[in-house]
Image (tube, helix red, strand yellow):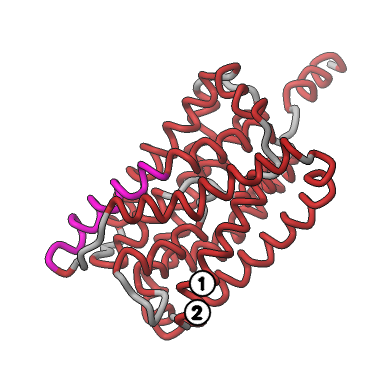
């Protein structure tokens, strides 16, 4: 178990982030400036809206202590590679999704340690173990920013190599993600059974409210349908792998995945329960305006 936590988890997340970076170019970041309003709304949703919703969910379901910190930790994590894949399946704006994922992953180096520090102090008080915000930030640089930068460098220096191996790396990242979630659940199986009655509904509520909330907010602001779908998915699907990986670092554990990491592990499974039917519904709603126009013309 020590090897799993200290070696396999950080290494797996690094590979997942490398798979994101190898698909990026500097042009992807230029899109941030070109589509500033849409990007800023998506970013604001991830930095502000999701944690606020998570706090309300924690209070509504009566979660306390390490379990509450775990839900908040999950809400602080940016969208992951999974959101890019789901956006593609939903016929969303993949370029916007990739830009949001990349930039928010880099910003999380600052936001996550600071917000986690507040969350631990707020929900655990005297029970909280001492941990360094700076050390957590440095760890995130090593397992997120550095692999993304390395992937981008590979793309820049050897584009043909990147094109050839990117699909394989993405497949490997998906397998590693599944292993991480499975290991986290198995390591905390008894705790999962004991807490699922409160934790499961809370996480489902968080997932559904954020996805629907992102869709409605983007719609209210007049964004295009593809942009609305993308923001909804980016807001609704969090990088649970990052939450699982950071949890032991927060409490200084080396013999288990800890209670703080449990919400991220459970969420990593539950988000597909809602994401699959949600994506299918989004696909059926593609280009609704032309269909209405055609119906009016027939009339």
Task: Please give left or right for residue 43 compared with residue 31 in the image.
Answer: left
Cα distance in 3D space between marks 1 and 2:
5 Å
Helix, strand or loop for disc 1: helix
- Where in the figure is residue 206, as x and y percent of width and height? 43, 52
The residue at which mark 1 appears reads as: 7
Name above or below for residue 36 compared with residue 104. above
The residue at which mark 2 appears reads as: 3
**Nearest the eye: 246 or 291:** 246
Question: Measuring 42% from the left and 31% from the top, which residue is drawn there?
Answer: 44
- Where in the figure is residue 159, as x and y percent of width and height? 79, 39
Q: Which residues are magenta?
A: 109-126
* Outermost residue toward the right in this view: 298
- For disc 1, the neighbor class at 10 Å (few under 14, some 14 to 19, many from 20) is few
* Outermost residue toward the top in this view: 297
Instruction: Examine the image and state in which quarter residue 193 appears.
Output: bottom left
Q: Are marks 1 and 2 in contact (CB under 8 Å)?
A: yes
């Amino acid at each position: 178990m020590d090897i799993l936590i200290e070696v396999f988890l950080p290494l797996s997340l690094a590979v997942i982030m490398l798979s994101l970076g190898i698909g990026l170019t500097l042009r992807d970041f230029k899109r941030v400036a070109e589509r500033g309003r849409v990007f800023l709304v998506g970013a604001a949703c991830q930095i502000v809206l999701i944690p606020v919703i998570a706090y309300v969910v924690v209070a509504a379901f009566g979660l306390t202590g390490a379990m509450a910190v775990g839900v908040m930790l999950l809400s602080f994590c940016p969208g992951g590679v999974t959101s890019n894949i789901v956006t593609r399946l939903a016929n969303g704006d993949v370029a916007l999704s990739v830009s949001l994922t990349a930039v928010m992953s880099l910003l999380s180096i600052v936001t996550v340690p600071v917000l986690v520090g507040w969350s631990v102090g707020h929900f655990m008080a005297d029970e909280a173990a001492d941990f360094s915000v700076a050390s957590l930030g440095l760890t995130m640089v090593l397992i997120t920013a550095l692999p993304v930068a390395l992937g981008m460098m590979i793309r820049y220096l050897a584009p043909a190599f990147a094109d050839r191996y990117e699909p394989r790396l993405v497949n490997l990242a998906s397998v590693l993600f599944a292993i991480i979630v499975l290991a986290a659940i198995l390591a905390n199986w008894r705790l999962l059974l004991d807490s699922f009655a409160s934790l499961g509904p809370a996480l489902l509520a968080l997932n559904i409210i954020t996805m629907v909330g992102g869709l409605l907010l983007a719609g209210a602001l007049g964004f295009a349908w593809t942009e609305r779908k993308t923001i909804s998915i980016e807001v609704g699907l969090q990088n649970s792998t990052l939450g699982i990986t950071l949890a032991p670092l927060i409490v200084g554990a080396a013999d288990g995945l800890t209670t703080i990491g449990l919400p991220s592990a459970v969420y990593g499974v539950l988000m597909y329960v809602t994401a699959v039917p949600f994506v299918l519904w989004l696909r059926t709603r593609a280009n609704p305006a032309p269909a209405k126009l055609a119906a009016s013309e027939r009339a």
